[in-house]
Image (cartoon, helix red, strand yellow):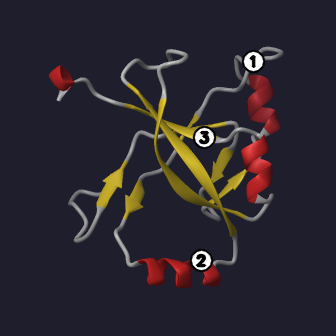
Amino acid sequence: MPKSAPDQGCYVSGLMLHHASWDSATSTLCEFDTAATQSSKTTYLSEPSPEKMPVIWLKPIQVTELDTIRKNQKAQLYACPIYGSTQSGSVGSFAVMATVELPTVEHSPGYWARQRVYLTAELLDEDQC
């Protein structure tokens, strides 16, 4: 996490990526590393453990600037949902908080949607703030 706040927007940390991996070298979504997946405590019909995402900078920009950025991207963008819960890992208590566009070159955005790729964030209760 950077030591100081950005001039605009905010940094978000602690998000967990499900059903995919993050390639830090290319800053894109990628398939799970099958060797690492097989050596983990994953069993048949269970999903691999989620992967911690790097810090994401949420920066406010004009819609026209966003359109230009999207047109100049070398990668396609997957609108990845972020689910939040006050109970870590509890099924059925998640709500969609937002989406974040994650670059993808290995597969189309539709592929990641079919794989049910998503991010989770554990929300703090008022008494934890």
Residue shown at 75% from the left, 18% from the top: 46
Is 112 positioned to the left or the right of 128 in the image?
Answer: right
Is 64 positioned to the left or the right of 42 in the image?
Answer: left
Distance of mark 3 from mark 2, alpha carbons?
A: 21 Å
Q: Contact, CB < 8 Å: mark 3 with mark 2?
A: no
- Image coordinates of residue 77 in percent, x first then y, are 65, 64
Element assignment for label 3: strand
Element assignment for label 1: loop
Q: Nearer the viewer, residue 35 or 26?
A: 26
Label 2 neighbourhood size at 10 Å, few (<14), some (14-19), many (20+)? few
Mark 3 lies on residue: 118
* Count of marks overlaid on the render: 3
Mark 1 lies on residue: 46
Q: Nearer the viewer, residue 1 or 7?
A: 7
Residue 70's mark?
Answer: 2
Q: Contact, CB < 8 Å: mark 2 with mark 1?
A: no
Q: Disc 2 or 1, which lies upstream in sequence? A: 1
**Of marks 3 and 1, the one in the foreground:** 3
Residue 18's mark?
Answer: none
Q: Is residue 108 above or below residue 48?
A: below
Instruction: Check disc 1 and give the amino acid type.
Output: Ser
Label 3 neighbourhood size at 10 Å, few (<14), some (14-19), many (20+)? many
- Which quadrant does the C terminus fall into? top left
Is 89 positioned to the left or the right of 80 in the image?
Answer: left
Instruction: Check disc 2 and give the amino acid type.
Output: Arg
Element assignment for label 2: helix
Residue shown at 28% from the left, 27% from the top: 124
- Image coordinates of residue 79 in percent, x first then y, are 60, 55
Q: Disc 3 or 2, which lies upstream in sequence? A: 2
Q: Is residue 117 above or below residue 99?
A: above
